[in-house]
Amino acid sequence: MNLETFKQAAENNPRLRRASVLSVTDITPHMRRVVLGGDMLQEFPEGFEGGYIKLVFLDHPASEPTSPIMRTYSIREHDTARGQITVDFASHSDTGGVAMDWVQSVASGDDIALMGPGKVKMVPKQADWYLIAADMTGLPAALRNVEMLPEKARGHVILEIPTEADKQDLPLPQGMSIQWVINPAPQDLNHVLLDAVKSAEWLDGAPFVWTACEFDTMRALRTYYRTERGVERDSFYLSSYWRVGRSEDQHKMDKRKDANAAAA
């Protein structure tokens, strides 16, 4: 990222931060971890793990000074002592796109602009039981949620990954079960995660449901949670992070239309 370009953009947006790439690691075949640091992250607010940042691609040809291209990713970890943020990037769908192109070529010493943090949408500390479900795109935030569960939590964790090698070590409360669902073709519209969630035992009591996945799967699960299981609106978080066959910008438009229709 050109320093002068950043300075000009920061004049229009004082919330913009410049970060340096400290390390790049493939933690599984389809998950790349990027650790960001630098002087401007020393004052990054605490307590936003599981929330999001927006990567800002100022040097991209399609970016404009007042309207740069931005992409949203979850904060996997935040080392406040070192001023470092860890972001895990999933390779999903038919890949491609501004962010994926950057992730595939990024190296230590590169710079990137970012904004944030955004809202943290974590599971509450109090619930009779929990259902946490995600595909690879929602995996970083889902894992952070699992790590923050109370010790006495009970329920299910259902995580879709493309290969067995994409499993990650995850300590669980004794009352929580985990199911890794293998979907070798996430770029094709299918019901792998949906079927796994609907097959899970529905426990007694009032649950909190947290789900992040593909757009059409999200809509099907919304119907399942609300209509078939009667989960109240304030008892679940449900979001799509991508959509089969659609670009990132097209997916954003789809989400906006869906949200407006759901609120009508």
Image (cartoon, rainbow, N blue to C red):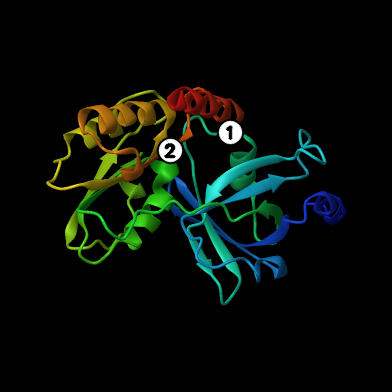
Q: Earlier in the sequence, mark 1 or mark 2?
A: 1
Task: Kindly identify which residue carries mark 1.
Answer: 96
Q: In the rendered image, is residue 229 in sight?
A: yes
Horizontal side, residue 248 vs residue 151: left or right = right
Type of amino acid at the residue the image marks with label 2: Ser
Could you give the CA–CA distance between mark 1 and mark 2, rounded to whole angstroms?
21 Å
As drawn, the label of residue 239 is 2
Q: Secondary structure at mark 2?
A: strand
Q: Is residue 87 above or below residue 180?
A: below
Image height check: is 244 above or below 156? Answer: above
Tell me: 14 left or right of 139. Answer: right
The residue nearer to you, when weighing 8 against 26, is 8
Circle 2 crowding by C-alpha within 10 Å: few under 14, some 14–19, many from 20: some
Q: Is residue 185 visible?
A: no
x, y percent for residue 16: 73, 55
Residue 254 vertical position relative to residue 207 in the rendered view, above or below:
above
Please name which of the two marks, 1 or 2, marks the residue nearer to the observer. Answer: 2
Q: Nearer the viewer, residue 241 or 209?
A: 209
User: Splitting the image into 4 quarters, where does residue 20 fall?
Assistant: bottom right
Kind of element beneath mark 1:
loop
Q: Is residue 52 left or right of residue 224?
A: right
Nearer to me, 235 or 253: 235
Judged from this view, the residue extending furthest toward the bottom is 81
Q: Is residue 225 above or below residue 157?
A: above
Disc 1 to disc 2: CB gap under 8 Å:
no
Rendered residue at 52%/52% (across/down): 119
Amino acid on which the number 1 mark rests in the picture: Gly
In the image, what residue occupies the spot 32% across and 26% down? 220
Residue 72, position as x, y percentages in the image: 57, 44
Residue 144 position, x and y percent, is 39, 57
Q: How many marks?
A: 2
Residue 201 % position (x, y): 13, 41
